Image (tube, grey):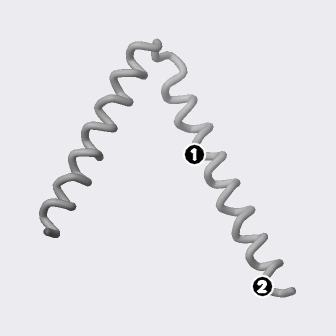
Amino acid sequence: MKTEVLASRIAGRIIRKQTQIAGYLNRKTQHWNKQSKLIALTLFVLLFGGLCIYLIIKSI
């Protein structure tokens, strides 16, 4: 029973923090148009996708 309560409290804190970060990011990008958001997403995917591919190749 105690572990369920503790897990629930931890999950609540994580969700609250995620909501705060999402609100912050939304405020920072609210003036961006659709094309700017698409470019940012593409750069993010290329950057971290490339990093993942690099790490996979390096580990082989």
Residue 43, position as x, y percentages in the image: 29, 32
Q: Height in image: 21 above or below 13?
A: above
Could you say whether the residue bearing mark 2 is in a helix, strand or loop? helix
| Residue at the front extreme, as displayed | 60
Residue 2 screen position, x and y as percent: 83, 87
Q: Residues within 10 Å of mark 2 (few under 14, many from 20)?
A: few
- Residue at left offset 83%, top offset 78%: 5
Question: Quarter of the image containing the C terminus?
Answer: bottom left
- What is the number of the mark on residue 21? 1
Q: Is residue 40 left or right of residue 47?
A: right
Position of 27 with respect to 35 (left or right) is right
The residue lying at 21 percent from left, 46 percent from top is 50
Mark 1 or mark 2: whose residue is earlier in sequence: 2
- The image quadrant that residue 17 belongs to is bottom right
Q: Is residue 33 above or below residue 52?
A: above
Q: Amino acid at mark 1?
A: Ile
Identity, as a three-letter code, of the amino acid under mark 2: Thr
Residue denoted by label 2: 3
Q: Secondary structure at mark 1?
A: helix
Query: Badge 1: how crowded within 10 Å, few (<14), some, or many (20+)?
Result: few
**Left or right of 60 on screen, residue 12:** right
Between 29 and 34, the residue placed more toward the observer is 34
